[in-house]
Amino acid sequence: RELKIFRLPDLCCITSRYGRVDRKANNSRIKIEIDFAQSIHRECPDLTSFQYRILNALQALGRNENDFNWTIRPAIVYLTEDFVDRCYGYLRPKRNPRSIHELTFEIGAGNYLAFSEDELLQCLKQDARFVVDGDHPVNADLQFPENERTEPTEREREKLAGSFRWASVPWLRNLLCS
């Protein structure tokens, strides 16, 4: 009897080929997504949902907002020291713990957040001004240490009031700043 030996292809070779094909397919899908969102963006440049779709697709391709020809450039918020200070200003007068989602909604309202809630949580955990209970953005609560909670100054109130989209209502702005 003759024994036939079949050589199986190398698993690493198959996964690398599949990965290349998968990346090409994903890139082509992403480019189709950009083309579709671009056509809508040209017709209705005020629709932020399509601006955000374009930004997400650009980020998936490893590009940034400067690689696209915008009709109206979207407002983008990055995880900077200024954003963390705005979080501090928002939480300072609060008594109850707040969630990461509430923080991003209130402070980053109307803007594209160029970071995830998980990245924000890790950044706030490293800042000594915040007390963070929880390891995941869904169940993490943020608050101030009890001994550091004080009333905000007039300048902080104005800065805090300016960060909210509903603060453009005059009577509400006067209420916040008084």
Image: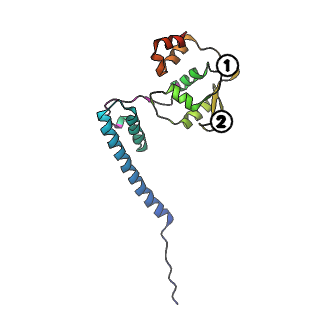
Q: Position of residue 87 (x, y in %)?
A: 56, 25
Q: Position of residue 165 (x, y in %)?
A: 46, 21
Which residue in the protein does label 1 denote? 148
Q: Label 2 amino acid?
A: Gly
Identify whether 47 is placed above or below 159.
Answer: below
Please give the label number shown on residue 83: none
The reply to whether residue 37 is in sight is: yes
Quarter of the view holding residue 56: top left
Q: Label 1 amino acid?
A: Glu
Residue at the right extreme? 147
Q: Secondary structure at mark 2?
A: loop
Pointer 2 local density, CA inside 10 Å: few below 14, some 14–19, many at least 20: few
Direction from residue 69 to residue 78 in the image, left or right? right
Q: Position of residue 5 (x, y in %)?
A: 51, 80
Q: Residue at x 50, y 65 (%)?
A: 11
Question: According to the image, what is the colour scheme of the structure?
Answer: rainbow
Please give the label number shown on residue 134: 2
Question: In the image, which residues are magenta?
Answer: 67-81
| Pair 2/1: label in front | 2
Q: Residue at x 53, y 29 (%)?
A: 104
Direction from residue 111 to residue 95 in the image, left or right? right
Mark found first going from the N terminus, 2 or 1: 2
Pointer 1 local density, CA inside 10 Å: few below 14, some 14–19, many at least 20: few
Q: Nearer the viewer, residue 172 or 55?
A: 172
Disc 2 and disc 1 in contact, CB within 8 angstroms: no
Q: Is residue 9 a member of the stretch shown in magenta? A: no
Quarter of the view holding residue 19: bottom left
What's the distance in space between the residues labelled 2 and 1, CA to CA?
21 Å
Q: Secondary structure at mark 1?
A: helix
Q: Main secondary structure of the magenta part?
A: loop
